Amino acid sequence: MTPAIRRHTISTAYSVCGGLTRKAARNFYLAFLLLPAEMRRSIYAAYAFSRRVDDIADGAAAPPRKQVLLDRCRQDVHRAAKGSARRWDPVSVALADAMVRHRIPAEYLLGLIDGMEMDLRVNRYSRFDDLFQYCYRAASLVGLICIEIFGYRGAEEARRHAIDLGIAMQLTNILRDVSEDASRGRIYLPSEDLARFGVSEEELRGGRSSPEFRRLMAFQVGRARTYFRRGRELLPLVDPAGRLCVQTLGAVYIRLLDLIEAREYDVLSSRVRISSPAKLRLALGAWLGAAPSW
């Protein structure tokens, strides 16, 4: 253990990450509670770091300052891969311990930073292939980090399905947040799809859903469900201790798609949300061994 690690005890560092996760991880926290304690705290460290990177990209700082902060995060990853950490930073301390403990490749975390960095310079995606690359970096790499913590068999097959599940979840986030993102100048829906269905960017900011927009959204939901079907194949490959967490996360996100469909794809007038009791029911269903709903 390095002097930097000793300055902030590992147990304290994990406790801080747990508090950050409990406060910020609205759609994840209940699923994380299904994990064994040691596995859960490593997930907290990974989440706290990814949340930090995401908050930098979405924050109010000027782009040059954001770049400086993201570069600092890269330095933290390089240190963590060697079992070291920035002084007095609990997230870095916990991340270093988790990376070494679970042999998490540094390239996963560095790629995640690259994904958040895309939000500093890219606010439109011409084709789905371009959006796929963003989703891979922003979400699939998180899935790859998670299965290193959970344990898995099947090597490349498991990693492929973890990528699929990450794509599905990020596409769902994008569909839920169309209006909010558009108001911030970001259009994640591919331009080729907007043109195909006759939907303008102005409509995304307007708060009213046209028949054309609903058809566009139906297509996007179908695409997300395709990736969920592929991602579901990860479940039998993940070690049992982590399987309930994966199952619950998938169920929560599928529920978001169900709610989008139920309101006839109107995500422009208000944000789609899952109530806390509904999330609890989904988590309880996984814990009781209910068949996956996705």
Image: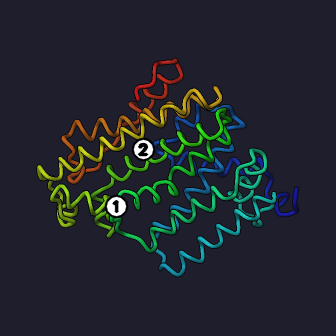
Nearer the observer: mark 2 or 1; the answer is 1
Q: Position of residue 130 (x, y in %)?
A: 41, 61
Mark 1: secondary structure = loop
Count the labels in the image. 2
Position in image of residue 123 (x %, y %): 37, 69
Q: Earlier in the sequence, mark 2 or mark 1?
A: 1
Q: Is residue 144 left or right of residue 122?
A: right
* Element under disc 2: helix
* Coordinates of residue 112 in the picture (x, y in percent): 57, 59
Around disc 1, counting alpha carbons within 10 Å, would you say few (fewer than 14), some (14 to 19), or many (20 or more)? some
Q: Relative to 193, is 117 above or below?
A: below
Q: Would you name the residue on which mark 2 appears? A: 168
Q: Is residue 268 left or right of residue 62?
A: left
Q: Position of residue 5 (x, y in %)?
A: 82, 58
Amino acid at circle 1: Arg
Alpha carbon distance from label 2 to label 1? 17 Å
- Report whether 117 appears left or right of 277: right
Give the colour scheme shown: rainbow
**Which residue lies at the image location 75% right of the left edge and 57% below the top edge?**
93
Q: Residue at x 42, y 34 (%)?
A: 229
Q: Kindly identify the residue that appears in the image at 34 percent across and 61 percent down.
A: 127
Q: Please, is residue 104 above or below residue 204 in the view?
A: above
Mark 2 Cα-neighbour bin, 10 Å: few <14, some 14–19, many ≥20: many
Q: Is residue 93 left or right of residue 56?
A: right
> On the image, numbered disc 1 is attached to which residue?
127
Q: Nearer the viewer, residue 194 or 276?
A: 194
Quadrant of the rendering where the C terminus is positioned: top left
For badge 2, the amino acid type reads Ala
The numbered dot on residue 11 is none
